[in-house]
Amino acid sequence: MLSEARKQELITFCQEAVRCKSLSGQEGLMASLLAETMKRSGFDEVKTDRYGNVVGKIAFGPGETLLLEGHMDHVDVSDPSAWKHDPYGAEIQDDRIYGRGTSDMKGNLCAMLLAAAFVKQDGSKKNGTILVAGCVHEECFEGVASEEIGEIWKPDCVVIGEASNLTVKRGQRGRAELTVETLGKPAHSSNPKMGINAVKKMAVLLNALERDFVPESHPILGDGILEVTDIISSPYPGASVVPERCRATFDRRLLVGETRQDVLGTVEALCHSLSDSDPEFKAHVSLAIGRETCYTGEEIAAERFAPGWLFEAEHPFIQKVLSGLRSIGQEPELSHYYFCTNGSYYAGKAGIPTVGYGGSLETLAHITDEYIEIDQLVKACEGYMGIIGAL
Ligand SMILES: [Zn+2]
């Protein structure tokens, strides 16, 4: 159990973090707070990489390297007037800390950092190395900045600190962003027969996808999803012109083992069958490319493809995490995330044993008057100490 002094230290640290507004690409202030706190709390080494990820290391002795990872960025506040609490005020009311990023996920990131520091202060751990990382650009770019952390620090196992209500998450669906463009032929819309209307071709494709795309299903992770999320014609706005291009974006949720080729191939095959029956049907399918600038000035770019992952309940790392949590009196259940996390890189791409564990509810992420219960914050910190101890 955390002492009163340690609880207060954690609450104050979490409040300071919430007051450092840190939208994706603007995490500099939050990164400085993490780095300074790591140095002050006795971390052996603290480094910031080219994207601005902050990583602190404590070497206890020989053995495995465990990475505790959380993202520093948060989504924006779309309507501040709808909030009863200042989104960046970190006000405490009814044993809750209110503010953007409290649940997603500064609370758990602060809990991870101090858990590692507290274990070092206690002086009983003699093996293994603990890394604590604050990652940039997670909110719209899962797993991309994490790749830099993974390649530089090479962890043997990873705990992602996204809210899990203190359950142990052993997997998640992945996510891909798919772009399909239909190609037409421009003409004056007073004489449409002279042209080929790309919007009408897109309508045919959307109907065909709705009818023919049967998502695979997984007993634990659920269904693979293909959902259209936006559509735009070109030229736009189009006055008196038959549009020559139409582009639609799709959110595709992936099950374990679905590759980028699977994702592209399914839609390409459907497009081929449509052009077999209509020679004027032409479409191009690709994965969307994300491009963002980091607060360090570095550009980060990648295809929007984050694989799904799932570990067996009996996996030795999962068993170790469970026993660590039981050792401090928690009775964690196994579950999985409904959203996409940086685990897509560590587990899905790099194959590193990974779990998710953190305080608070997944459903409190991104909401108006986001908060974290202080009890959950404290228990998460105790849980991370238990996991570190079990390594
Ligand atoms: Zn998050």
Image: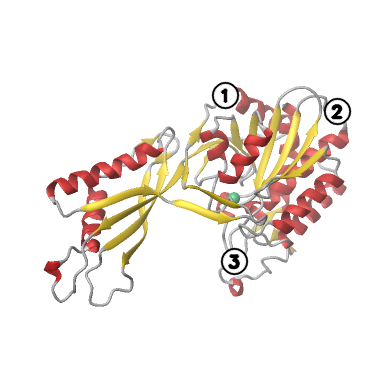
Cβ atoms at labels 1 and 2 below 8 Å apart: no
- Rounded to the nearest angstrom, the CA distance separating label 1 from label 2 is 27 Å
Q: Do the residues labelled 3 and 1 touch (CB within 8 Å)?
A: no
Whether 241 is drawn above or below 1: the answer is below
Residue at image mark 3: 77
Quadrant in the rendering for residue 248: bottom left
Which residue has dot 2 on it?
124
> Is 289 placed above or below 147 here?
below
Marks 2 and 3: which is nearer the front? 3
Question: What amino acid is labelled 3 in the image?
Answer: Val
- Tally of numbered discs: 3
Q: In which quarter of the image is residue 200?
A: bottom left
Badge 3 crowding class, 10 Å Cα cut-off, few under 14, some 14 to 19, many 20 or more, is some
385 to the left or right of 277: right
Q: How far apart are marks 3 and 1 (CA)?
A: 39 Å
Amino acid type for the residue under numbered disc 2? Ser
* Whether residue 17 can be seen here: yes
Residue at left 46%, top 46%? 303
Q: Is disc 3 placed on a helix, strand or loop?
A: loop
Amino acid type for the residue under numbered disc 1: His
